[in-house]
Amino acid sequence: MASGTSGTSGGSGSSSGAAQMADTTAAPSAEKWGFPLTELYRLAFTFYKRNSGKAIHLSYEDNLKLIAFKQQAALGPFNTSRAPALGVLDVIGRDRQQHWQLLGEITREQAMEGFVDLLDTMCSAFRPYIEAVRQDRDETLRKELRLMELEKEARERQENAQQELLEEGYKEELQRRQLQDALNKQTYQQFKLYAEKQFPGNPEQQAVLIHQLQREHYHQYMQQLHLQNQNQLQMQNAEEKGQQEDNAPGNNNNSSTDLPNAMEGLKLGEIETQQEQVEQQGQAEQAGGTVHEQLGEEEYDDYVMICPAKIWTRPDIEQFKTEVSAGDGDGVITIGHGDTVTVRVPTNMNGKCIFWEFATDSYDIGFGIYFEWAKPVTNEVTVHVSDSDEDEDCVDEDYLSTTEDLESGSLSQERGAVSNPTAPPKAPISIIVPIYRRECYNEVYVGSHSYPGEGVYLLKFDNSYSIWRSKTLYYRVYYER
């Protein structure tokens, strides 16, 4: 017991000095250590608890001092009423209470500072540990700040890109509406007459059909415009490639054409020239007879500008088949496998526009339309069937003799001079709609075209790609005044 008392009195002076040191701390813990006091005390107590008896070895007196600071920081000044009861032989518990009591009335914050400073004095490894924790914390904070900055920049870029897309989309939508409005005004009367024939006395159905026709016409117009620009780009690339082969290699970047800009430049230009083309068509009709009379003497080199055809679809396929079948039977044709049917429709002197409608049972069919610049010898609509192996004097045979796929819709206009040179010259033929396979078993395909002059329309229904299957075709052709 004497030795325990001696140790206790020695510890009293040390604990009193530690308390004075805690009261007179010159610099705040945040400036001295880089951590708030509460967090610094937590780190110090964790370091002491993990390493006591392992990495650090403290004397009995030093442990009593640290435990006294810990009790003061956790529970405040010593109070006998709150102190736990001690046994008669509990010497260690009595020493701890005496050291705690010697701290007096210092605050909890002062007790925390005393614990940290005393641990720093007794253990040389404590300060490097705190420095390592602080550096790790600072590095983590820097990474988090950098990540926040990157996320902020990414959000700003995304917002700017979305804003640009919205602005571009608004401009494109405005231009699209302007173009569509112009096309709708141009075709309204024509589609109105057609709708009145389809739904007489029903304005609501007429309005629905007109809207559908105008929408389909707009899509067809944009497709043709896109193909036209693609052809122009291919021609430009071919010319530039030829120049590069002749000249020294150079930079080819400045010769590329932006397709959207080309389409933009052509949109309103096409509409503005429509009226001029109509006037040219009228002049071509007047001069048609004179031109065709001269075909036997000289080549027909000057082609009249042909307006693109308008093609759309409508869903009432069963009703259409019933109406065509209820007629005289001329509108229903069975096209054998490997055959091509050509429906020759001469222009009518009282008409200005041709209309066609067709559908099939269960399977698709190739369809295209051409114009033969020859004065009609009859006003009757005639049907010609040609086998794919026959060598007839028809445009579809020239088409079938090419090595290109039917799906491409391309047609070689160059015809070989293999016929008899003494035979009369053939009438020129212009392509209005290239041959494509049409899925006309689900809906009725409808189209119209303004007369480019006097001649004969050739409606081609091509089944040459089918080896075994025949097709049943329902069609109807008429003209409009």
Image (cartoon, rainbow, N blue to C red):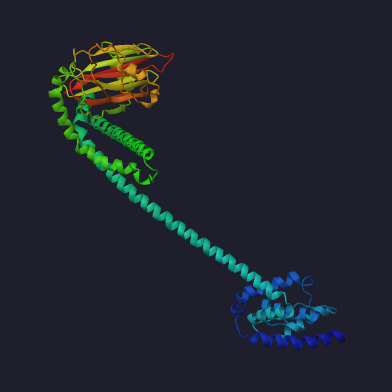
Q: Does residue 42 show up?
A: no
Residue 109 higher or lower than 280, as above or below: below
Pick the quarter of the image with the N terminus: bottom right
Pick the quarter of the image with the C terminus: top left
Picture coordinates of residue 292 (x, y %)?
Answer: 17, 18
Name the quadrant containing residue 323: top left
Name the quadrant containing residue 186: top left
Residue 332 higher or lower than 439, as above or below: above
Residue 467 higher or lower than 38, as above or below: above
Pick the residue in front: 230 or 342: 230
The residue lying at 65 percent from left, 73 percent from top is: 131
Q: Does residue 210 show up?
A: yes
The residue lying at 33 percent from left, 21 percent from top is: 367
Residue 33 higher or lower than 428, as above or below: below
Picture coordinates of residue 272 (x, y %)?
Answer: 19, 38
Pick the residue in front: 184 or 350: 350
Quick check: 42 left or right of 370?
A: right
